[in-house]
Amino acid sequence: MLFVTGFAGKVVEQAIASYGKAHHLALPNIEYVLWAIIFGLVIANTVGIPEAFRAGVDTYDFWLKTGIVLQGARFLLGDILKLGGASLACVAIELALGIVLMTALGRSFKLKPKLISLLAIGSSVCGVSAIIAAKGAIDADDEDSSYAMAAILALGAVSLFAFPLIGRALGMSDHAYGLWAGLAVDNTAEAIAAGALYSDEAGRFAVLAKTARNATIGFVVLAYALYWIRQGQARAVGNKAAFLWDRFPKFVLGFIGVSALASVGIFSRSQTADIGNLSRWAFLFTFAGVGLRTNFAELRRQGWRPLAVGVIGECAIAIITLAVVLAAASRFAL
Amino acid sequence: MRISRDWWAVLAAAALLVLIKLGAVTRVPW
């Protein structure tokens, strides 16, 4: 189902482009990314996903992670280090900002304390996977975590449409826009889709910024777990190193490993192009999955307050990170 | 021992890289 939905998106993009070319029309170029997501949204929110296909659709994050590891071939370690300074500073600012802002907002909206923690972790680090990692660590209940996930996913869906428009309106470079998308969009799949919607190059930088955020997941979750243990409301953490390793996203190691192999020149130019195309196919399945697992009726059922906190917090984070990225872009010529 | 989805993704990517390096997979279309 992921393949059919994603491939349909690719076929429609190409069909529109060739129709425009044949008839000498300047049709807007709507990327396959958006078509795949729209087709997925339509299927999930009309006929629904048949039971037989659910397990297949749930593999979307496997394709996402495989795509990210393969993307490593398109980044030389030198590039990552060169990016490092400015981009990592932006990541650090975003993390602190996400936690402080979401905590303050959650308190003023009188949300439950653990829900506030989940929203703060989800918006600062990496959306759904961070919330799932944190749920067990701080003993949050299912309702709180589905609230937090719904808020993050709803905003991710909106950002897919809003971010490219804002980026174009501001005339952002691929690098600066990709960095912004990777910092401000919380869920990894949506962040990479938002980047890819702008350009291939922007998609690469979104992967890099988002991967850097993902790498911090263990530390942020550990800090929250220790806080809730002190409050006497979470199980004690035994070995901290084992806790960190357990929650560390291992595909980040794969990404760095492949990047190291590419840096020592192990792949020829044509092999790198092939690896890049394989990663595009993997992302195509991911983008179809983003649409297919977004259920508007479920999101509506979660109520308005967590969503309100999410909307206000995410908009503020998006605006401030945009300002930070624009400042970094003008200072470091990103 | 259960292998997490993260590791499966790394293994899948590694297998694809080996196939590409060996020349078993070439000219991947897009």
Image (cartoon, rainbow, N blue to C red):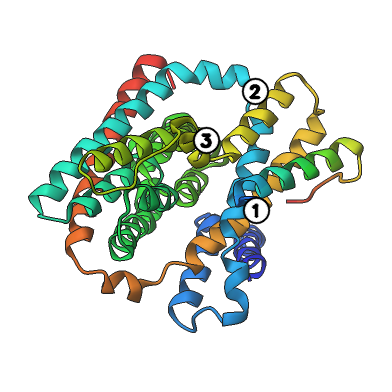
User: Label 3 to label 2, Cα distance in Å?
Assistant: 25 Å
Q: Are marks 3 and 2 in contact (CB under 8 Å)?
A: no
How crowded pointer 1 is (Cα within 10 Å; few <14, some 14-19, many 20+) is rated as: few
| Quarter occupied by residue A124 | top left
The residue beneath circle 3 is A245
Q: Secondary structure at mark 3?
A: helix
Q: Secondary structure at mark 1?
A: loop
Chain where mark 2 sits: A
Quarter of the image with the N terminus of chain A is: bottom right
SS at badge 2: loop
Residue A266 vertical placement versus A189 (above, below): above
Look at mark 2 in the image and give the residue it sits on.
Answer: A76
Residue lying at 31% horizontally and 32% vertically, measured from the top left: A94
Looking at the rendered image, the disc whose residue lies closer to the viewer, 1 or 2, is: 1
Decide: few, some or many residues near mark 3? Use Cα within 10 Å; few <14, some 14-19, many ≥20.
few
Badge 1 vs badge 2, beta-carbon distance below 8 Å: no
What amino acid is found at the position of numbered circle 1 in the picture?
Arg
Closer to the camera in the image, A79 or A215: A215
Query: Does residue A231 appear in the picture of this structure?
Result: yes
Q: Quadrant of the C terminus of chain A?
A: top left
Q: Which mark is residue B2?
A: 1
Disc 3 sits on a residue from what chain?
A
**Quick check: A188 left or right of A94?**
right
A307 on left or right of A19: left
User: Relative to residue A117, is residue A47 drawn left or right?
Assistant: right
Name the amino acid, label 2. Answer: Leu
